[in-house]
Image (cartoon, rainbow, N blue to C red):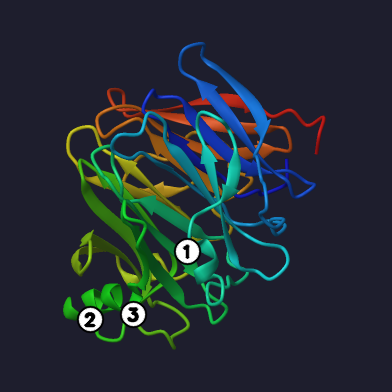
Amino acid sequence: MMDNTSLSATTLPNFDRQLYFQKNSGSLHRMNYSSQIGLWQTSDVPRQDVPEPRISTPLAASYIERSGESDGTFYLVFVSSANDTLECLSINLTTNNGEPCSDWSEIQTFATVSESSQISVISLTNKYSAFTSYLIVYEDLSKKLVVLYYFASQRGDHTWRDETDKFNAALSSDGHTGARISTECKAIMIEDAYSMYCFADLDPNATSDNRILAYFKFQIDNSTTTSLSNTFGNPEDFSNTSSELILIPQQSSINELPMWFKDSTSEVPVGSLPSPNSSFPNHRLASTYANATSDVYLYHQASESLLVEEWWNHTGRIWIPRNVTIDTSSR
């Protein structure tokens, strides 16, 4: 497994979990956890007619379930090695076939990604939806954070839309005139309500004491309504933040709590929850949850062959670590 590999995790309706990572060869792999037998298994990510991933590519996975379908689809987003454009794999849950995502080539003329380690993707589709819709956040070559919205109906018509300005406008309307989302955003859906947390620079030209953590509640359809519900912390709390940013749903409400690394030397992620009692030699994190009132899992890399799954125990309000060994016979 590549040192400091990007990680991305997602949960299926049957409570199985999938964890994606990159090996030293650059190939993409996943760990599949079976909730029935309680075991992890490693497998290659099927990749047909999709370019090679960039070394140390960011990864973002999302499970999409649609009305009337007996099986769902994984979307795995990464950066290509050839031209630093966003790539997307659509992986069928039943057949395990992987192919390019529909309509994806249209965004590649402008969706070129910087050296940032961050991409996020959230499905805006649930099992009652007759359409496909998702949100992608990435950092472009100018270091500008971009929020892209995709919608496709059952009729086959579709649209890509840049929603970045609307999130920045929400910041300005809350009194942060000129502020811009920056570095990273993570979005989450709980009970059909969408939230997104972003680091935001109050003054894009400033060099320090400048960053806040912004919290958006939003709905996106043919027209977009974006509102800023809250902001967190004083600017100096986030000025040297070393992402990853993850979101932990809470059992007692539909709210969620963010966690992040305060700076590049941080030994554990910080936030409103207690920090896990584990070593974090790498700062790449992933998290997933079964649903808003159930188990939450945080993943991080301990060594070339070891990942750690931290289970958040709501009742005891503690993190319980479990080791996940990676097969390194094929690197």
Near-viewer residue (258 or 161): 161
Label 1 and label 2: CA atoms lie apart by 22 Å
Which residue is outermost to the front? 155
Q: Is residue 90 left or right of residue 131?
A: right
Say which label, 2 or 3, has the lower sequence index.
Answer: 2
Q: Residue at x 42, y 35 (%)?
A: 72
Q: Position of residue 106 (x, y in %)?
A: 50, 70
Q: Is residue 237 left or right of residue 284?
A: left
Q: Which residue is mark 2?
A: 172
Q: What amino acid type is highlighted by mark number 3?
A: Leu
Element type at marker 2? helix
Element type at marker 1? loop
Element type at marker 3? loop
Q: Which residue is mark 3?
A: 202
Q: Is residue 43 left or right of residue 64?
A: right
Q: Residue at x 80, y 39 (%)?
A: 331
- Is 16 rendered above or below residue 36? below
Q: Quadrant of residue 231?
A: bottom left
Eye-nearest disc, 1 or 2: 2
